[in-house]
Amino acid sequence: MAFWAGSFTLFELSRYDPSVPMGHQPLVALPHLATLGIGVGDGGVITDTYPIVVTAVLHLVLSMVYAAGGLMHSLLFNGDIGEMGVKWARKFDFKWDDPDKLTFILGHHLFLLGLGNVQFVEWAKYYGLYDNAEGVVRTVVPNLNIGMVWNAQFNFLAINSLEDVMGGHAFLALFMMSGGLWHIVTKQAGEYTTFKGKGILSAEAQLSWALAGVGWMALVAAFWCASNTTIYPDTFFGEVLDLKFSISPYWVDTANLPEGTYTSRAWLTNIHYYLGFFYIQGHLWHALRALGFDFKRVSNAIGNADSATITLN
């Protein structure tokens, strides 16, 4: 992922045409960097390519570090983390029937995700984001009104203030880090029952939950990208889309574009939607397998249907 981000940013930068609106070019990485205020000036035009190149090269360097770390762990270290000589690493050794260790690991995941939100909020506060309404990069102080966050969950597509967006991320950071600390320091309360995962937890169950979460986020991102110009500025992603229906839902451009070309918004929206759809199908598949359903029985039943004898009473 890091290698793709770095290499594709350089690829897009080499083909960027400043005479054509960014949203009308087949770009993915540059619009996202532009929303963070990286390399763009007033009006959303790229004025300085240096920070973009630095960001891309940093991702390429980190991709090599990640690859080296992966090779080191696979070739040099013990395959069983419970047998490693590093004491703190052994804390993350787990078995599926050990709820205390599972909640301990979950807590670390939540806490690190919360730190990511903190980093995003601090970036907006000190370095700024691109404000589509004003056409400038400006610093953003988060709106910490909990009422705004509560009300926005029912109408989040209509959010039109960067302060509200960053306020939501600030509260998300608080909730995730608090939940992370809770899971790190607490132990299993009461009996470890089936409702809490006994006899159900497995690698396949974990995969099904991960696919469900990623799928849901992809669907939310698709609807947000299609219609919201605060988070996805039309300067960088193109005009909002129209929802159409055929065999399945899809979004089309409302801008007058040359034949065979699409806005960045159209690419991102449709890709997010269909990836989300198939992630949800993968979630259902692996969830049923985790519960013990054998899909081979379905194919065997279909294969035996021709030879089956059907009687009517």
Image (tube, grey):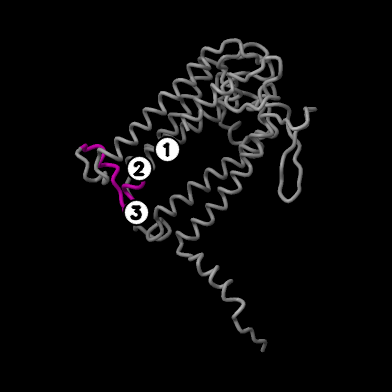
Q: Is residue 86 left or right of residue 43?
A: left
Three-letter amino acid code of the residue under disc 1: Leu
Please say whether residue 92 is one of the residues in the magenta stretch: yes
Per the image, the residue denoted by label 2 is 105
The secondary element bearing badge 3 is classed as loop
Residue toward you, 227 or 252: 252
Q: Is residue 93 left or right of residue 308?
A: left
Instruction: Tell me where residue 62 appears, x and y as whole percent.
Output: 40, 26
The CA span between labels 2 and 3 is 12 Å
The segment highlighted magenta reads 86-103
Label 1 vs 2, first from the N-terminus:
2
Residue at 29% in and 35% down: 72
Q: Is residue 102 left or right of residue 21?
A: left
Going by the picture, which residue comes out furthest to the right? 256
Circle number at residue 96: 3
Give above or below for 24 relative to 76.
above
Q: Residues within 10 Å of mark 2 (few under 14, many from 20)?
A: some
At 56% from the left and 23% from the top, the residue drawn is 11
Q: Position of residue 233 (x, y in %)?
A: 66, 24
Q: Earlier in the sequence, mark 2 or mark 3?
A: 3
Residue at 61% x, 10% y: name it.
47
Total numbered labels? 3
Percent x, y of residue 164? 60, 26
What secondary structure is found at the residue carrying circle 2?
helix
Mark toward the viewer: 1 or 3: 3
Q: Which residue is mark 1?
A: 110
In reply to whether residue 222 is colored magenta, the answer given is no
- Labelled pair 2, 3 in contact (Cβ < 8 Å): no
